[in-house]
Amino acid sequence: MECRGWYLAFTILMGVDYVVGADAAKAEAEVTNVRLGTYPGTIRVVLEASTTLKISSYVLVSPYRVILDMPEVRWRLPMGAGHSAKGFITGYRFGRFVPGRARMVFDLKRPAVIVRRFTLPSSKGRPWRFVFDLKGATASAARERAGRPAVAGSSKLHRLPKKRPQKKTRSRKKVVVIDPGHGGIDPGTTGRRKRVLEKDITLAMARRLKRELDQNSRHKTVLTRTGDVFVRLRERIARARAAGADLFISLHADSIPDNRVQGASIYTLSERASDKEAAALAAKENKSDLIAGMDLSQNSKQVTDILIDLAQRETMNHSVRFVRYLVGEMRKSTRFLRKSHRFAGFAVLKAPDVPSVLVEMGYLSNAQDEARLTRPRYRARMAKAIARAIDRYFAARAETAGQ
């Protein structure tokens, strides 16, 4: 994950608010450098900051990572920060985790434990420093010493809340939940040429779509995130259900190895992927919680409960019907892949009672798609097409219900 030195210029280009700067303006501390060094059998990590920080550090397994949690900070790291590799550290990511909290995640090739940690006060022009030493360990030793301290402001979702009951009147506004993919410490993919981040593209598009839907006042629109903050996959589902969602639209702009491929596609849920590319994309997106350093070792029952609820096939059928309208309207102004409608097991589409689609707006690995998605006018045309599809979908459902 790269430094955001270019971020302000990019957001002006994108026509959106400077979200990261606005959120971080409240933070007094700045993280200015991260240094990696080695000495026999040990890797030392030194984090430099403008003032004292209260930092929690711990190791997670499956995969192996070191997590640093701290109060919200401004990130003032050098260009290319995060790509540094040293010993069994392959790189690191950083960003906003939850409101008021920031996180760094160091990826490890193999098991390790923290054997020493300490701080050094600022003196003689040198910044405040947080230091920790990592040493290789056996898998069992890493597992025994792994831990996840409580993080103020984080949310642990033990089960999906009940969907908020809605009044069964034909005049009630339909609730459309728009889900900007990724966010905070999870940047998503990075553009091939302009180096734009997927999390910024999706948020810009979600805001534009919300404005489009709010204009006609026929629907109530809710965003799963309104700023540059990390939201767990299942929490996105929970927020949609708590809002009483009638339709859930997740926005993404991913990348694939072949940078010649361009065009949009729409995904609906299926445990059997429509092709290898769809399966690989779903597997990549479903790792978002791991990317942000979440401990998912205790979640097997929750996932099983969600999968059991998927027996409600009617919801998936409604999702497929919406795709027909969506592709029909978006084709008027948007280039599509040959297979415009695909199926895969995206975790974010697993709300058992809310029709849900995932819109891949284009590939940031393709220079043409990246250029299109950074243009506000292009996003405006796409928003209008999606809004028309939503209107047609709800009108068709109302007509069917009235028969």
Image (cartoon, rainbow, N blue to C red):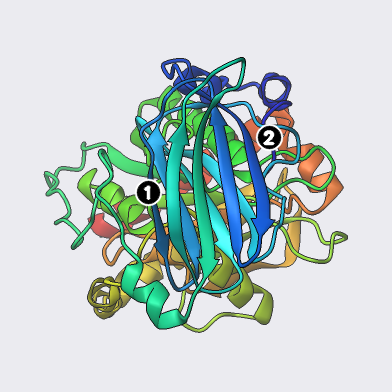
Residue at image location 25% in from the left, 52% down from the top? 241
Above or below residue 250? Residue 219 is above
Instruction: Name the residue at 16% across, 56% down.
Output: 161
**In terms of depth relative to the viewer, which is nearer, 88 or 344?**
88
Residue 322 visible (yes or no): no
Please state if 44 lies on the left or on the right of 243 as rendered: right
Query: Mark 2 = which residue?
Result: 3
Q: Where residue 9 sits: x, y (%)?
A: 73, 20
Q: Position of residue 170 (x, y in %)?
A: 20, 42
Does the image show residue 65?
Answer: yes
Q: Nearer the viewer, residue 114 or 243?
A: 114
What residue is at 57 percent from the left and 20 percent from the top? 18
- In the rendered view, would you say 228 is above or below 151? above
Picture layout, residue 240 above or below residue 153? below
The kind of secondary structure element at disc 1 is: helix
Q: Amino acid at mark 2?
A: Cys
Callout 1 touching callout 2 (CB < 8 Å): no
Q: CA distance from mark 1 to mark 2?
A: 43 Å
Please give the residue where the numbered disc 1 appears in the rendered image.
394
Give neighbour class at mark 2: few <14, some 14-19, many 20+ (Cα, 10 Å): some
- Identity of the amino acid at label 1? Phe
